[in-house]
Image (cartoon, grey):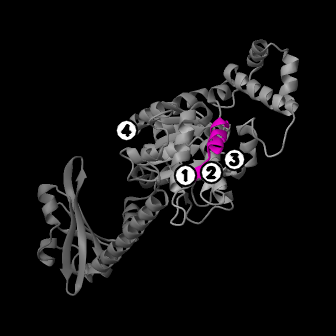
């Protein structure tokens, strides 16, 4: 490559001049000897670094003019040498040496030298860069440190026993993990616990909500971008979350809302273990465990062609399903007890729930799950007087739907019947499904027409 096309256009003398000019433009000092050890060429930078003028060295055996020269050794043993300290007067520098081959025979050797002042400067800059990188790593590690472990999960010995056992095993695998559950069930708590349990716990845990970031920005958030990729891009580009979470865990919440155009790119990263920044040409490897979570039925989204089937199966390496709070009633009282215990203060060390308040909390369906229960308890603690929580201290929604025997204001039998009917209908739809076929089964089971069912749902 190169020589043939150049020599076709240049005479031999012109080519030699061109080659010397090229080498002379290099910022490092260059010295070349032939197979006999005679100096054939030195460039301007060599003179600048060593102070040795070409007239005093070119055409002479190197060992005669430079006592202790190391370069001739390359002619004898064919070895490359790096970082050799040399001194000329008050000038210090380091050299790298290498033999020059043609047709597998040594025909000379070359020495590349660099001023020690420059080496010191580069070393100092390298040290500074390493310190900055270390500070960045420490900052990232601190910013994205997990708070929760499996010990923080309430119900791990009851309703959540199976998903917790599965999650603990998954923490030591390299499989992608899909956590499914309604809003407020603690999907991120599970993700953090998995990260804290496994071998990646010393590295970053980085969460991102796929539904909270505009689609046009999400790609650059995940993969980063090169400088100048678009008008508002930052100088120096941006590091993406995949790169930040290298060797750690990337938690993609609300994965069901990931734009379809990004799903193919995510699939490729999961398959190849490599990312490419927006506007970039090169790919780089990443070692990341991906945990995803959703409150949607990804299977149905696949059927509706709103989620890629191949990505669904790639994400679903380990499936963890967190049941809603209403399906594990035994955990409600346990959760309440823990919250009440944490609510104690020096002034009132023990806060108690009345039997009626406890019954109301237990009977409520908690559509917002543990998040709603947490808020309800703290609301009651703020509303109470003294060390006792009564039903009147609970949020109105919980009071209204948590009991059909007590209300702040008297209600008619018709209202109570209406509420009870809707509650039973919702439970039946949950059992048979929200599809048309499921609603037909619900209507048949309840002994009403499909039209009546729709009317009651809409009331």
Identity of the residue drawn at 71% across and 43% down: 398
Which type of secondary structure does the marked residue at label 4 adopt? loop
Q: CA distance from mark 4 to mark 1?
A: 35 Å
Q: CA distance from mark 4 to mark 3?
A: 45 Å
Placement of 294 over or under 279, stated as above or below: above
Q: CA distance from mark 3 to mark 1?
A: 15 Å
The disc at residue 25 is: none
Q: Chief secondary structure of the magenta span?
A: helix
Q: Which residues are magenta?
A: 352-365
Placement of 110 over or under 268, stated as above or below: below
Question: In the image, which is nearer the foreground, mark 2 or mark 3?
Answer: 3
Q: Residues within 10 Å of mark 2 (few under 14, many from 20)?
A: many
The residue carrying mark 2 is: 377
Q: Quadrant of residue 186?
A: top right
> Does residue 136 appear to the left or right of 432 in the view shown?
left
Question: In the image, which is nearer the foreground, mark 4 or mark 3?
Answer: 3
Identity of the residue drawn at 80% across and 12% down: 447
Q: CA distance from mark 2 to mark 4?
A: 36 Å
- Residue 375 lies, in percent from the top left, at 64, 51
The residue carrying mark 3 is: 391
């Amino acid at each position: 490559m190169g020589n043939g096309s150049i020599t076709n256009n240049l005479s031999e003398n012109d080519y030699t001049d061109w080659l010397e000019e090229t080498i002379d433009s290099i910022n490092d000092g260059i010295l070349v000897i032939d197979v006999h050890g005679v100096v054939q060429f030195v460039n301007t930078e060599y003179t600048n670094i060593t102070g040795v003028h070409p007239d005093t060295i070119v055409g002479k055996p190197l060992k005669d003019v430079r006592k202790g020269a190391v370069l001739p050794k390359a002619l004898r043993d064919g070895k490359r040498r790096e970082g050799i300290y040399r001194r000329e007067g008050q000038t210090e520098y380091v050299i790298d040496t290498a033999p020059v081959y043609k047709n597998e025979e040594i025909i000379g050797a070359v020495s590349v030298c660099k001023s020690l002042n420059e080496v010191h400067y580069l070393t100092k800059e390298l040290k500074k860069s390493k310190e900055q990188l270390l500070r960045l790593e420490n900052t990232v590690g601190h910013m994205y440190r997990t708070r929760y472990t499996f010990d923080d999960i309430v119900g791990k010995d009851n309703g959540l026993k199976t998903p917790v056992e599965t999650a603990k095993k998954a923490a030591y695998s390299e499989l992608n993990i899909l956590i499914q559950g309604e809003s407020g069930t603690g999907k991120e708590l599970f993700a953090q616990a998995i990260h804290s349990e496994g071998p990646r716990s010393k590295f970053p845990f980085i969460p991102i909500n796929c539904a909270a970031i505009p689609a046009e920005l999400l790609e650059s958030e995940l993969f980063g971008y090169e400088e100048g990729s678009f008008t508002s891009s930052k100088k120096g580009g941006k590091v993406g979350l995949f790169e930040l979470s290298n060797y750690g865990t990337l938690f993609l919440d609300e994965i069901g809302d990931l734009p379809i155009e990004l799903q193919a790119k995510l699939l490729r990263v999961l398959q190849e273990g490599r990312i490419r920044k927006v506007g970039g040409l090169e790919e780089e490897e990443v070692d990341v465990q991906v945990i995803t979570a959703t409150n949607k039925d990804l299977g149905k989204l696949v059927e509706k062609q709103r989620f890629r089937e191949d990505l669904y199966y790639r994400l679903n390496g380990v499936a963890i399903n967190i049941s809603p709070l209403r399906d594990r009633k035994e955990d409600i009282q346990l959760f309440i007890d823990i919250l009440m215990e944490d609510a104690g203060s020096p002034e009132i060390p023990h806060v108690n729930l009345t039997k009626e308040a406890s019954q109301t909390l237990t009977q409520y369906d908690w559509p917002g799950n543990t998040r709603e229960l947490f808020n309800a308890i703290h609301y009651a603690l703020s509303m109470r007087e003294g060390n006792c929580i009564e039903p009147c201290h609970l949020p109105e929604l919980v009071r209204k739907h948590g009991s059909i025997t007590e209300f702040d204001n008297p209600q008619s039998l018709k209202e109570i019947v209406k509420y009870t009917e809707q509650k039973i209908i919702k439970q039946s739809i949950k059992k048979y499904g929200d599809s048309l076929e499921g609603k037909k089964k619900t209507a048949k089971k309840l002994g009403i027409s499909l039209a009546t069912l729709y009317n009651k749902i809409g009331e």
